[in-house]
Amino acid sequence: MKFTFAAALSLSAAAALAAPCCLAQSGNGLDNPDWAEEPVQAPPQFSKDRLMPLDMPAHVSVMVGVDPQTIVVGGDGVVRYVIAMTNATGSTNAVYEGIRCITDEVKTYARLNASGQWSLLANPAWKAVNDNMPSHHAQAFARQGGCQNRLATSQQEIVSALKTGRMANPGSRRN
């Protein structure tokens, strides 16, 4: 079968027109009024030995890191992960969270309690990533690779961005 330039051009144009349609149906766009969050799985096991450090402001005295094996990108466009914070004495706190990149919102699903067990939050709610007080770890994770151009990419791309530090914030330090 022989393709002409006109036929190739027609196929390219058809593909270009179809692409926005398919992206809009992916479930994580703002233009989808039927968006719904997928059921959240139990917090995954994490390891302090695998933590990838996040760049945090200089005034943050704890080490903050994400376990790359806990990063999951859902079909709903939510990036779920475990972030751990370790203080100078070695005590570790952790949270299981999700970021909806397209809306720049974060939700905390569970916290690791003092006995090492996950404590699920009764009514987790979405809130702005930049309103993540008193800690800015979710914002740091989102800006350093968790979200790329307000999109949830893939686990591999997120880990790659975190490794290269290409999205690190000026004025911060890798802790």
Image: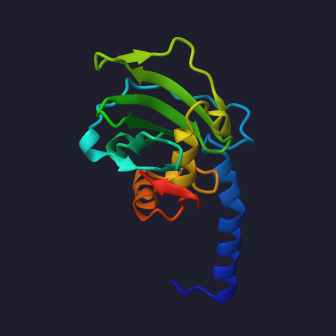
The image shows residue 96, relative to residue 56, as above or below, that is: above
The image shows residue 23, relative to residue 7, as above or below, that is: above
What is the basis of the colouring in this image? rainbow
* Residue 39 visible in the snapshot: no
Outermost residue to the top: 122
Where does residue 149 sit, x and y in percent of width and height?
63, 56
The residue that appears at 51% across and 65% down in the rendered structure is 166
Where does residue 11 sit, x and y in percent of width and height?
65, 73
The residue that appears at 46% across and 62% down in the rendered structure is 165
18 vs 169, nearest the viewer = 169
The residue that appears at 49% across and 23% down in the rendered structure is 109
Q: Is residue 104 left or right of residue 120?
A: right
The residue that appears at 24% across and 44% down in the rendered structure is 49
Where does residue 53 sit, x and y in percent of width and height?
39, 50
The image shows residue 16, relative to residue 86, as above or below, that is: below
- The image quadrant that residue 130 belongs to is top right
Where does residue 15 sit, x and y in percent of width and height?
65, 66
The image shows residue 66, relative to residue 121, as above or below, that is: below
* Residue 13 visible in the snapshot: yes
